[in-house]
Amino acid sequence: MIWLYPPAAIALLALAAPIVVHVLVRQRATRIAFPTLRFIRPHRLASVRRRALDDIALLTIRLAIFAVAVAAVAGPFVATAARRREWDARTIRAEVFDPDSRYGLSRAVVWLERQPPGRREIVVRGPLPLGSLTATDIAMVPSHVGLRFERTSVPTATRTLPATPVIQNGRIVERETTLNAERTSVRDVAVTGTAAPAIEIAAPAEEHAAADGLRRALLNERIAAALPGRGARIMFASEAASLSTVSTAWIADAAARISRDTPWDVDLAFGSDGNRLVVETRMHATDARALTLVHVLARGLASPIERPADEVVPIPDAQLSAWTRGAGPVPEAAPEMIDRDDRRWLWATVLLLLLIESVLRRDRKQSGVAKGSARAA
Amino acid sequence: MTVGTAAANAELIARISDLELVARIVVEGLVSGLHRSPFHGYSAEFSQYRHYRPGDDLKYVDWKLVARTDRVYTKQFRETTNMGAAIVIDTSASMAFPERPISKFRYSVVAAAALAHLVSSQGDGVGLVTTNAFLAPRPGRQHLRRLLAALSSTAATGSWRPAETVRRASERLGRRGLLLVFSDLYDQENETFAELRRAARMGHEVVLFQVISRDEIEFGYRRDVEFVDLETGESLAVDAAAARRDYTDAVTAFLESWRRRAGAEGFQYSLMVTDVPPDRALRNFLVARQTPQNR
């Protein structure tokens, strides 16, 4: 049995309230010496009267009403054999048409988790170029979810795209990339203007010469040009790590790419200074790796060319066949999958018990009136 | 502290251990305003007429008055000879209730001491009969002191045995005397009544003080109470609030029954509630005694 709202069962603790009250109000009779007992008629003790169950049937019915109502609120669901057969018979399919299949695949997995119980399958349709899906993406799909791939078109044989501009000799050089399988090439297409250094280099006084060399390299050695409005400051031989927190999206993105692309295990601390990325490192400007680090920093400020949808080489059919699999057995239903629970039956039971309780109550009342009349007579 | 204020406070009286002092205080409080001795015997000095009661000696019937009025009257004479009075006090354990402010027994002892003082001061003899003490009625101050000492040393324990006490008192009174009985009358009801009637048949004047506390009348208890019988030790636990109505009905019927039966037999009946100061209770009793219908 599955409970859709298990916390509601806490209300069942209220069933213990009568017992708790009885225990708390239990009192010992005061002992008093009295001249004679001849005029005192036996009367049940108040504490006993409170503790005693006058009508067990009525109490049981009322407790049952409360318990069943609480159970109804908790949303019970019984996974019967018939229901399991029904779930096995149906397949819930998510179709991904998104050109960015990786993103579409993850959205399909999330969507399937919220669907009613049943076999699950994801069908990815599209040109499926190389890079649009990787083994990592496939591994993130739960094993019981089936996978199929339908190539809807063949990727274009060649495609020309703008490439990241570079700075050479103080000028910005625009470039373009021609994707053509193994003959893919990049070429310069225009020189558009004078480049201002986007990276400020700071170093101790004894390393100023090395720092100047790095600055010159920034303007002359075909280092990627930063996007407009972006800048950075790198501080070599820095021990302090009192950087302000990064809160700008592009700075965080750039810091992540710089960390990823740095080829050595070197300590880097990232922060921001207004709309500028600040990087601190213990590396000295005289270090042979300093120029490489500046290159990585420049690429971090540039526009990344990561557009797998533009890829002209398709994922090999053999790979797609290897990833293809059938829908597995229906997993144990989670509360969020249940579209229709069994609470209606419990509410019907509550109504029935209420009816019985009212009949019992009326019966007790009438018998009480009859006893009173008899006593009066 | 004045005698008057002391006499008006039952709780204070309960604390005074000198019974003679208590008796004097009570008597001084109650005799002021009474014009003459409230106790009447039979003597040669005519005092007044009163209605004939069964058991009265026919030689005291005024036949001339009968002829004139068609009603039977008995002549009453002022006591000139020593009158005998016997005080009987119920010393059963039930009289020890309530413990505070004053028990029925202590209240009875104070009232009895006051009456003994009063009777003795008139020159009459007074005696005492309890389950454990007996003093024959005699006049005199020395005897009064012995009686008060006996009263002081008596305690409310055991059970009420009217066949021993009331009968012994009535038999030792000899000639017509005054029998003063203090009891709550809970126990041996029929036997007590039979002995009192027997005393009346012997010609004694029976005065019955039914002593009871306010708690016994109103039953002002609440919640669950386990009542323990002072005499039998039995206990009964009840919801006092629920039991109150039945209890008060039963007690009211019990008291009314004794009042009615006493009246029917010619006893002078007086209900004494322990929260009423003894001097006031005795004063009420004596005033009632002096009214014509009680003579």
Image (cartoon, rainbow, N blue to C red):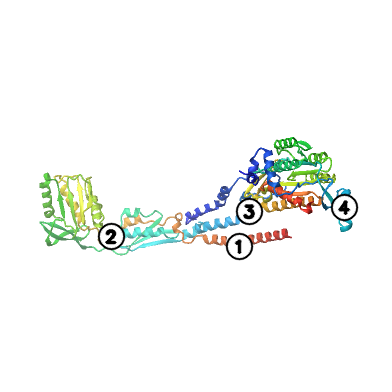
Reply above or below: A169 against B138: below
Badge 4 vs badge 2, beta-carbon distance below 8 Å = no
Please name which of the two marks, 1 or 2, marks the residue nearer to the observer. Answer: 1
Comparing labels 2 and 3, the label whose residue is closer to the camera: 3
Which residue type carries mark 3? Answer: Ile
Question: What is the chain identity of the residue bearing mark 2?
Answer: A
In the rendered image, which residue does mark 4 sit on? B62
For badge 1, the amino acid type reads: Leu
Q: Identify the residue under disc 1.
A: A355
Q: Residue furthest front?
A: B45
Tell me where residue A190 sits by quadrant. Answer: bottom left
- A374 vs B72, left or right, is left
Circle 4/circle 3 CB separation < 8 Å: no
Q: Earlier in the sequence, mark 1 or mark 2?
A: 2
Residue A155: x percent and y percent? Answer: 27, 63
Give the residue pinned by disc 2.
A129
Residue in front for this viewpoint, B105 or B171: B171
Residue at mark 3: chain: A
Residue A353 or residue B259, whichever sits in front: B259
- At numbered mark 3, what does the secondary structure look like: helix, strand or loop? helix
- In the rendered view, would you say A18 is above or below A158? above
Instruction: Judge from the rendering whether residue A201 lies leftward or rightward of residue B8; answer left or right.
Output: left
**Quadrant position of the N terminus of chain B in the picture:** top right
Q: Which residue in the structure is indicated by mark 3? A: A56
Pick whichever, A318 or B156, lies toward us.
B156
Q: Same chain for marks 1 and 2?
A: yes
